[in-house]
Amino acid sequence: MEKRTARLTVLVDPQKKAAFEKLCDEEDVTPSQKIRQFMRDYIEQALGADWKEQVFNKNKEG
C-alpha cells in the first residue's frame, strides 16, 4: 500500500528525544517505527477505520 517514503524533519528537545529513544529501545522498535505508528493511530482517530481507503485512493486520483 505504501510504496514511497517522504522525509519528515521534526525539532525536539534533546532530553525528550533521549527519553523517547530509550523507550523505543525498550520496546525493540526504532523511533521511526514508533512515529509511523503514532501517525497511523492519529489518522485513524481523525478519519475513521476506513482511513486507508480515503488516504491512498485520494493519492491515486491526483
Image (tube, helix red, strand yellow):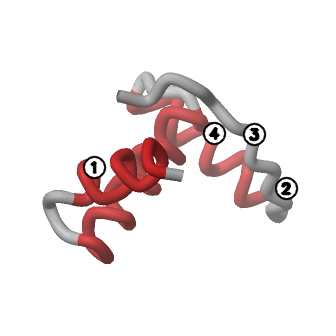
Label whose residue precedes the other's in the sequence (3 or 4): 3
Find the distance from the CA under tag 2 to the CA under tag 4.
10 Å
Residues under numbered marks 1 and 2 in contact, where contact means CB atoms less than 8 Å apart: no
Nearer mark to the viewer, of 1 and 4: 1
> Which residue is disc 4 drawn over?
21
Find the distance from the CA under tag 1 to the CA under tag 2.
33 Å
Mark 4 neighbour class, 10 Å CA radius: few under 14, some 14 to 19, many 20 or more: some
Label whose residue precedes the other's in the sequence (1 or 4): 4
> Which residue is disc 1 drawn over?
52
Find the distance from the CA under tag 1 to the CA under tag 4.
28 Å
Label whose residue precedes the other's in the sequence (2 or 4): 2
Mark 2 neighbour class, 10 Å CA radius: few under 14, some 14 to 19, many 20 or more: few
> Which residue is disc 2 drawn over?
14
Left/right of residue 8 with respect to residue 20 in the rendered view: right
Residue at 34% across, 48% down: 57
Left/right of residue 14 with respect to residue 2 in the rendered view: right
Residues under numbered marks 2 and 4 in contact, where contact means CB atoms less than 8 Å apart: no
